[in-house]
Image (cartoon, rainbow, N blue to C red):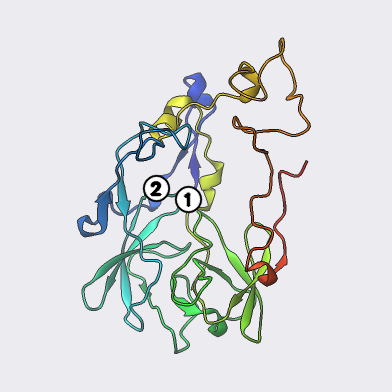
């Protein structure tokens, strides 16, 4: 999907770009597969803000995406490619041979009329959209929506343009290279969908102005260093000042900006061969 750039008629237009929706084949979602999304504006049951910078935005409906694909060995035809406001990737509407309809994350390269299949036992053709256990896939191929536990449904590799490469299959585990650079082992009986996720140019969009961001349910974010000391640990000082602390902090005094949040004794640490690349290393 290419990115569309308009003539710079205003300052916002000059610094913004939009998606090209030429790949969308249907503009209204399947009514039987949507539920209303209730806005909570980042507030908990007491009405207190627990997640900052949320609120307003356009009304959305949640598309119920099938991450399990447990209708095994029943061919499904791709009926449409649709836009989903809740994610960067496109959705594909499947119509199974028995008439049931389900949404899946659309892989790159699929089009209306293609037939896809999900299986647990037999070996099938390795084409984008087919869902197969890792042990039946060739080494070096790219997949997405990979399970971490057999039967739990796809948990990793959902983002627009994401792809996970199968590096090796040995013993009871398959070795995968994730988009973050992490190399980890997953039980080879876990299922994965062949191909990369659709809409890889999503990351290239420039929103251009605050108004487009407000439509996405994101409120303005004020830097801590421009606040007063009473409002933020980074606040205070005259003019433009650095943070001035040994390490950055959140408004509540906890370490921030590039801090590792994973538990040191996580039960799956033994399955991680190479840690992800830390882009925020200081």
Q: Residue at x 38, y 73 (%)?
A: 69
Residue 272 placement: quadrant: bottom right
Direction top: furthest residue: 238
Secondary structure found at label 2: loop
Which residue is denoted by mark 1 in the rendering? 1
Q: Earlier in the sequence, mark 2 or mark 1?
A: 1
Q: Nearer the viewer, residue 37 or 229?
A: 229
Counting from the top left corner in percent of width and height, residue 83 is at: 36, 50
Direction bottom: furthest residue: 122
Q: Nearer the viewer, residue 163 or 256?
A: 256
Counting from the top left corner in percent of width and height, residue 210 is at: 47, 26
Secondary structure found at label 1: loop
Instruction: Report if residue 29 is visible in the image.
Output: no
**Tag 1: Cα neighbours inside 10 Å, few (<14), some, or many (≥20)?**
some
Residue 233, above or below 100? above
Measure the alpha-carbon separation of dots 2 and 1: 18 Å
Counting from the top left corner in percent of width and height, residue 27 is at: 28, 49
**49 displayed left or right of 261:** left
Which residue is denoted by mark 2 in the rendering? 86
**102 displayed left or right of 153:** left
Q: Nearer the viewer, residue 53 or 174?
A: 53
Q: Residue at x 56, y 24 (%)?
A: 222
**Tag 2: Cα neighbours inside 10 Å, few (<14), some, or many (≥20)?**
few
Q: Nearer the viewer, mark 2 or mark 1?
A: 2
């Amino acid at each position: 999907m290419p990115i569309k750039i308009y003539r710079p008629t205003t300052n916002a237009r000059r610094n913004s770009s939009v998606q090209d929706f030429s790949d969308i084949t249907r503009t209204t979602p399947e009514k039987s597969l949507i539920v209303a999304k209730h806005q909570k504006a980042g507030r908990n049951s007491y009405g207190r803000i627990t997640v900052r910078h949320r609120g307003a935005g356009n009304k959305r409906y949640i598309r119920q995406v099938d991450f399990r694909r447990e209708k095994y060995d029943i061919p499904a035809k791709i009926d449409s490619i649709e836009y989903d406001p809740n994610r960067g990737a496109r959705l594909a509407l499947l119509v199974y041979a028995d008439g049931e309809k389900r949404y899946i994350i659309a892989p790159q390269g699929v089009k209306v009329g293609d037939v896809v299949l999900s299986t647990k036992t037999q070996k099938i053709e390795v084409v984008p959209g087919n869902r197969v256990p890792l042990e039946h896939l060739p080494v070096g191929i790219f997949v997405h929506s990979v399970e971490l536990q057999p039967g739990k449904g796809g948990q990793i590799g959902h983002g627009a343009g994401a792809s996970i490469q199968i590096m090796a299959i040995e013993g009871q585990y398959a070795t995968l290279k994730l988009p973050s650079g992490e190399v980890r082992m997953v039980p080879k009986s876990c299922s994965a969908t062949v191909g990369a996720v659709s809409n890889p140019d999503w990351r290239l969009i420039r929103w251009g102005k605050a108004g487009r961001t407000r439509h996405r349910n994101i409120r303005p974010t004020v830097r801590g260093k421009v606040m007063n000391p009473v409002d933020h640990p980074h606040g205070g000082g005259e003019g433009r000042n650095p943070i001035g602390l040994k390490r950055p902090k959140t408004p509540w005094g906890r370490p921030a900006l590039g801090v590792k949040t994973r538990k040191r004794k996580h039960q799956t640490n033994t399955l991680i061969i190479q840690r992800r690349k830390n882009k925020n290393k200081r």
